[in-house]
Image (cartoon, helix red, strand yellow):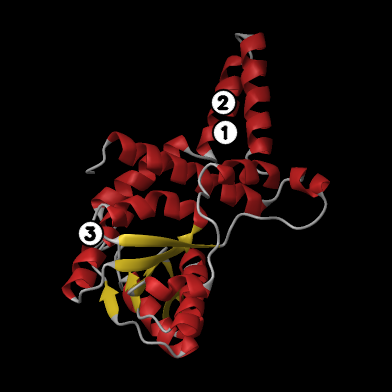
Amino acid sequence: MDGASLMVLAHRLLGALLLPPILNLLPIVAGAMLVRRWQHAGRLLLAFGVALTYLLSIPQTAMWLAQGVERYPALRPADLATVDAIVVLGGGKREAPEFDGNAPGADTLVRLRYGAYLARHSGKPLLVTGGAPMGGEPEAEVMARVLRQDYGLHARWLESRSNTTLENARLSAAMLKADGATRIALVSQGWHLARAVPFFRHQGLQVLPAPTAFIRYDGPAAARYIPSGSAMAECHTLLRESLGMLYYRLWPGA
């Protein structure tokens, strides 16, 4: 963990206590501890924990939660005619021995793919932003390498010192303004842009949201009530993002 940001570690620890799976395990553990002495209360807590676990593991809940944070519609490459740059936000990296180094995490990869798609269709320059909040190689360097090797595109700007989305905005804005770029398309998941767009606008940039990877499910409606690991992960992500929005609403300069 050398080089890891203590602030990011603290945020992750706090999030772990307030989010699934700990969120839904707590009433189950409490119910199991109380059921012998206070049978009725213990059983209620156990039932609540089981019901919460089910609800936070089905696609339908993920879609309900997404409605609160996916605020921006999909755009078309033609909508980028007036922007000066396309900014792609980092979303994590992973060790990739098959590539003899680091590779983008799942969130970063979908953002990169969409950023490359927009860049190819619009001819606008790219900025990639992301530091190394958990240490090691900065995400921006990983992103730039993948853009170059896999998409044949070169990022004009690399912002590699940020540890949070708020720092992404502050440091990227300084780079862009130094080159006279003030109108951007901001690429990330739809659930992330609800928090990220205001950060960039507060830096004096004109922001066109460019969401990708919307929370959607194929198949019959009944299948949305069948628990799955992917739905559980999406519920965790969406709840975490809602907590993040609340945090910055209460402490806007944090």
| Labels 1 & 2 near each other (Cβ < 8 A) | yes
104 or 151, which lies in front? 151
The residue that label 1 is drawn on is 24
Give the side of residue 55 with respect to residue 74, left or right.
Answer: right
**Is residue 97 at all visible to an observer of this figure?**
no
Amino acid, disc 1: Asn
- What's the CA distance linking mark 2 and mark 3? 40 Å
For this orientation, the residue located farthest to the front is 82
Total labels drawn: 3
As drawn, the residue found furthest toward the left would be: 178
Q: Nearer the viewer, residue 25 or 131?
A: 131
Residue assigned mark 2: 27
Secondary structure at numbered mark 1? helix
Q: Which residue corresponds to the image point at 37% horizontal and 43% vertical from the top-left?
A: 13
Q: Which callout, 3 or 1, points at the residue further toward the start of the chain?
A: 1
Label 3 Cα crowd, 10 Å radius (few <14 / some 14-19 / many 20+)? some
Q: Is residue 77 left or right of residue 32?
A: left
Question: Disc 3 designates what residue?
Answer: 170
